[in-house]
């Protein structure tokens, strides 16, 4: 399949998700006519619609990044294999219901937010932090005093900047207290691999990383 156009990439993700156009209307109230215009490359989706489609695909267990869907940059999407269904088919433990791995991750995340109400959580949406953080891994960090960011050089952080959360390493702290952010793996670099002179709204050193369960099979 030709994936040079955004419409082709949207259709590709929809096929991986095993969704028909009526499915998107029924499950997510996403207009069939609008989707048809996108997939036929008659009209390009807005950033808001792209984010809406990303949420739909992720909800349907398709691992896809913003960079790939919008610009065709990075690795092609893949289906998230639900290891919990495999586990439940293989194991029966005294008829006690199993808690699946995604539920366990969510329980941990809620505990962090209970212990640290100001904590920031996020999901890695690129491949540039491998092998430390992989695509779709969950992370959390605790915000620190912006006046003390000089201690954070070479530290992996969640950074809120211009209404977006980035997961980056603090590469350099400049004299004016702006910071330069960088990924880890230049071979997997996205368009935002290196960000310079950033004035963060919030910066939170990462304290928790949970791997995507799909990485273990």
Image: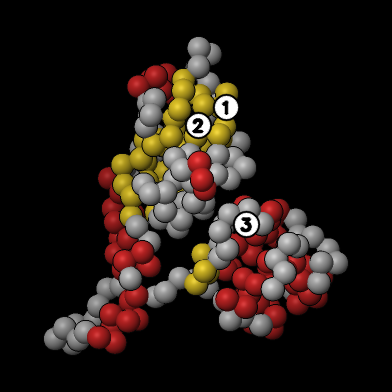
Name the element at disc 2. strand
Do labels 2 and 1 touch, CB within 8 Å?
Answer: yes
Rendered view: 33 above or below 91:
above
As drawn, 95 above or below 113 = below
Within-10-Å neighbours for mark 1: few <14, some 14–19, many 20+: some
- The secondary element bearing badge 3 is classed as helix
How many residues crowd around disc 2 within 10 Å: few (fewer than 14), some, or many (20 or more)?
Answer: many
Dividing the picture into quadrants, the one containing residue 65 is bottom right
Q: Disc 3 versus disc 2: distance between alpha carbons?
A: 21 Å
Q: Which of 110 and 70 is in front in this view?
A: 70
Instruction: Give the CA distance from mark 2 to mark 1.
Output: 6 Å
The residue pinned by badge 2 equals 181
Relative height, residue 163 to residue 135 (above, below): above
Residue at far right of view: 42
| Residue shown at 45% from the left, 58% from the top | 136
Label number found at residue 2: none
Residue that badge 3 annotates: 68
Type of colouring:
secondary structure
- Out of 135 and 138, give the one closest to the viewer: 135
Circle number at residue 196: 1
Please say if 35 is above or below 153. below
Q: Residue furthest front?
A: 187
Real-space Cα separation, disc 1 to disc 3, in angstroms? 23 Å
Q: Tag 1's secondary structure?
A: strand
Instruction: Work out whether residue 34 can be spotted.
Output: no
Please state the horizontal and vertical placement of residue 192, each as a whole percent of the image. Answer: 59, 40
């Amino acid at each position: 399949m030709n994936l040079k156009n955004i419409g082709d990439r949207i259709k590709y993700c929809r096929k991986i998700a095993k969704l028909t156009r009526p499915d998107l209307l029924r499950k997510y109230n996403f207009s069939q006519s609008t989707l048809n215009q996108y997939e036929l490359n008659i009209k390009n989706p807005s950033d808001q619609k792209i984010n809406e489609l990303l949420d739909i695909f992720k909800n349907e267990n398709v691992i896809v990044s913003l960079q790939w869907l919008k610009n065709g940059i990075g690795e092609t999407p893949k289906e998230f294999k639900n290891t919990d269904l495999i586990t439940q088919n293989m194991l029966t433990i005294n008829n006690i219901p199993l808690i699946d791995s995604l539920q366990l991750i969510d329980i941990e995340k809620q505990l962090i937010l209970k212990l640290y109400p100001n904590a920031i959580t996020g999901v890695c949406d690129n491949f540039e932090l491998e092998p430390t953080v992989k695509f779709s891994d969950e992370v959390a960090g605790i915000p620190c005093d912006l006046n003390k960011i000089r201690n954070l050089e070479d530290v992996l952080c969640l950074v809120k900047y211009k209404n977006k959360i980035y997961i980056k390493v603090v590469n350099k702290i400049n004299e004016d207290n702006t910071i330069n952010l960088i990924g880890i793996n230049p071979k997997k670099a996205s368009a935002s691999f290196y960000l310079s002179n950033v004035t963060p709204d919030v910066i939170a050193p990462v304290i928790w990383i949970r791997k995507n369960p799909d990485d273990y099979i």
